[in-house]
Image (cartoon, rainbow, N blue to C red):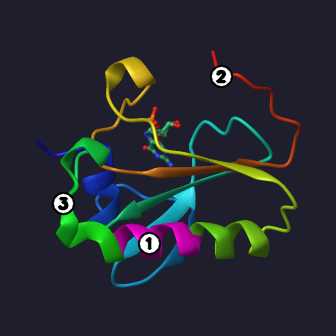
């Protein structure tokens, strides 16, 4: 099934791009939950963390590393890295994505 993120990857839908390479794309969330709210998605169409395999190990490390580089470039001292997995956990787009959220005090535990 094609998701909104597939359409962003193919250029059908525009995004506010932050970073791009041959493995991933990072862009600003359309409904930011904090002053900085960036999504990092793999170009590979993986639905969620439920669907990863050993083959994705390097890619997942790459996404996390880019998350740190992007958070540092945004000047964040603290941030939260979130991967919602499955509907009950709050996943609404079924193309794997990492949220980088920061720039304000964040509460815990999540709702
Ligand atoms: P999830 O709830 O699946 O973890 O996160 C999906 C995120 O995608 C949400 O934070 C939502 O605001 C964001 N989002 C949904 N559609 C679009 C879109 O068309 N463009 C951008 N930039 N973000 C989107």
Closest to the camera, between mark 2 and mark 3, is 3
Secondary structure, mark 2, is: loop
Residue where numbered disc 1 is placed:
61
Q: How many angstroms separate mark 2 from mark 1 (CA)?
A: 25 Å
Residue where numbered disc 2 is placed:
110
Mark 2 and mark 3 lie on one chain; the one further toward the N terminus is: 3
The residue furthest bottom is 22
| Quadrant containing the C terminus in the rendered view | top right
Secondary structure, mark 1, is: helix
Secondary structure, mark 3, is: loop
- Label 2 beta carbon within 8 A of ligand 1: no
Residue where numbered disc 3 is placed:
53
Q: Which residues are magenta?
A: 59-66
Residue 94 part of the magenta segment: no
| Residue 30 at x, y percent in the picture | 56, 42
- Whether label 2 touches label 3, CB < 8 Å: no
Q: Residue at x 81, y 34 (%)?
A: 106
* Drawn side of residue 69 relative to residue 26, left or right: right
Q: How many angstroms separate mark 2 from mark 3 (CA)?
A: 28 Å
The residue lying toward the viewer, choosing from 108 and 15, is: 108
């Amino acid at each position: 099934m094609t998701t909104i993120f597939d359409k962003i990857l193919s250029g059908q839908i525009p995004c506010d791009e932050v970073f791009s390479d041959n493995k991933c794309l990072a862009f600003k969330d359309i409904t930011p939950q904090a002053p900085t709210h960036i999504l990092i998605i793999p170009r590979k169409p993986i639905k969620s963390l439920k669907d990863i395999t050993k083959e994705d190990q390097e890619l997942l490390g790459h996404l996390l590393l880019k998350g740190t580089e992007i958070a540092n470039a945004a000047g964040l001292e603290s941030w939260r890295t979130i991967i919602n997995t499955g509907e009950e956990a709050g996943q609404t787009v079924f193309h794997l994505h990492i949220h980088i959220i920061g720039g304000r005090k964040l509460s815990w535990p999540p709702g």
